[in-house]
Image (tube, rainbow, N blue to C red):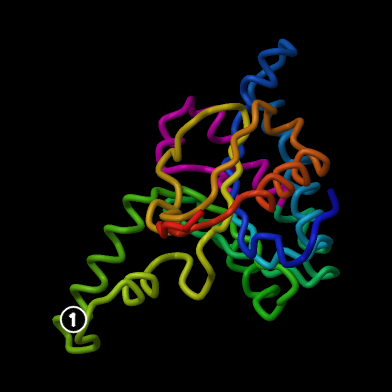
Amino acid sequence: MKLKKEKLPRHVAVIMDGNGRWAKQRNLPRLHGHMAGIDSVRDLVTATREIGIPYLTLYAFSKENWSRPREEVRGLLQLLEIYIQKELALMMEHHIRFRAIGQINDLPERLQRMLGDVMEKTKKHKALSLNIALSYSGREEILQAVRAIVRDAEGGRIKGITENTVKKYLYTSGMPDPDLLIRTSGEMRLSNFLLWQMAYTEIYVTETLWPDFRRAAYEEALKEFARRERRFGSVKEY
């Protein structure tokens, strides 16, 4: 089945799960799984750009991940620095806009500066918007939006509160909601990811562990999405 442009999602979100299990199966430290997972990130970003999907959001580090062993957290943050440094050239060459979403202030200052630098350098790119969720919590995102809306309403800056009002206060403001969520490693849950945005997102779960999820597996997920009939809560006559 050939991928048809009109059947492609505009926005793909991915929960990249299974790095630890991948490493365990090979009797390797967990960090080796995360290192292998970087290659899958590169493959997915490149494929998304070439296929022509304009938005990609990757769940890289959740708010809850801070509770992992300190050594693993430190290693993950170091890997993120390496990824940012190595991939900037690719983003510049292929006109990819980079955004970090989440509670970025939780991150080390050096990493915050690196993220800010890449976001500034790529902010005018339009071929693909690549969003990396870091220290991210869907519930916290909604809470922050509510607090900001209340503050602006009290200050007279907004009068009515609608669904569109809320969208403007989310990290994903200005982007379409994800059409497709891909979760690797077979887990059947959202894990506090984009809770508001995924009200009508199609969910695709694969047993493939994230380090093994490459272009062929990605295209299979896109083909499955193309076969589905999206109803957005409506009822069709048969």
| Position of residue 15 in the picture relative to residue 155 (left or right) | right
51 vs 229, nearest the viewer:
229
Q: Would residue 60 be found to the left or right of residue 54 on screen? A: left
At 39% across and 48% down in the image, what residue appears? 137
Residue 46 colored magenta?
Answer: no
Choose between 175 and 119: the one closer to the eye. 175
As helix, strand or loop, the secondary structure at mark 1 comes to: helix
**Image x and y of residue 49, in percent:** 79, 62
* Residue highlighted by disc 1: 153
The reply to whether the magenta stretch includes residue 77 is yes
Residue displayed at 45% across by 34% down: 189
Q: Extreme left residue here? A: 154
Is any part of residue 110 visible from this angle?
no
Amino acid type, callout 1: Ala
Residue pictured at 53% horizontal, 71% vertical: 175
Neighbourhood count class around disc 1 (C-alpha, 10 Å): few under 14, some 14–19, many 20 upward: some
Q: Where is residue 45 in the image (x, y as percent from the top left)?
A: 75, 54
Main SS, magenta region, reads helix
Q: Which region shows up in magenta?
A: 58-83
